[in-house]
Amino acid sequence: MGKLVNEWKEKDKNKELYDKIAQLKKLTILQLEELLVPLLEKNKYVKFHMKDPETGRDVFVPFIVYDGDDKRDERSSILTIQKLMKKTLESTNWRLMSNGVNYRLGMLNGRLRAYEKEEDLLKLVK
């Protein structure tokens, strides 16, 4: 009983953070793909697809996409897609992994991470 009371006090004390958590769009893997594909295609990244999710304590989803803009070099391609993804995912429960995006011969790959548990979401909004 005391634990429950402490949780209520914690939530009341950090109401602002818990309100931010409530405002996050908690997307499924399919919804995530539907969000990213049009954005990436608009910015000349094509054939975006996700590989099989890696599940455990957390969910990680590897992805591959191709840069369709011949004028972009490796560095600008990586920076552009990272910026696009970070900005787009900011209001969701998904994030681009900190090891970022890799580039080889016009192909970019990386990993996305889902945050599901309340304590993880709390860290995310802080």
Image: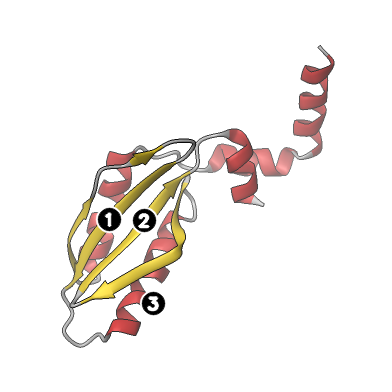
Amino acid type, residue under disc 2 in the picture: Arg
In the structure shown, which secondary structural element does the residue marked by tag 3 occupy? helix
Residue 77, position as x, y percentages in the image: 30, 78
Earlier in the chain: of badge 2 and badge 3, it is 3
Marks 2 and 1, Cα distance to the nearest angstrom?
A: 6 Å
Q: Is residue 120 left or right of residue 48?
A: right
Earlier in the chain: of badge 1 and badge 3, it is 1
Amino acid type, residue under disc 3 in the picture: Leu
Residue shown at 66% from the left, 38% from the top:
18
Marks 1 and 3, Cα distance to the nearest angstrom?
A: 16 Å
Earlier in the chain: of badge 2 and badge 1, it is 1
Residue shown at 59% from the left, 49% from the top:
124
In the image, residue 82 above or below residue 3: below
In the structure shown, which secondary structural element does the residue marked by tag 2 occupy? strand
Residue 49, position as x, y percentages in the image: 20, 53
Residue shown at 16% from the left, 84% from the top:
70
Marks 2 and 3, Cα distance to the nearest angstrom?
A: 15 Å
How crowded pointer 3 is (Cα within 10 Å; few <14, some 14-19, many 20+) is rated as few
CB atoms at circles 2 and 1 under 8 Å apart? yes
How crowded pointer 2 is (Cα within 10 Å; few <14, some 14-19, many 20+) is rated as many
Q: Residue 46 is drawn in which quadrant? A: bottom left
Q: What colour scheme does the image use?
A: secondary structure
Can you tell which mark lies on residue 79? 3
Can you tell which mark lies on residue 26? none
In the image, residue 105 above or below residue 61: below
Amino acid type, residue under disc 1 in the picture: Phe
Q: Mark 1 points at which residue?
A: 63
In the structure shown, which secondary structural element does the residue marked by tag 1 occupy? strand
Can you tell which mark lies on residue 111? 2
Residue shown at 23% from the left, 75% from the top:
104
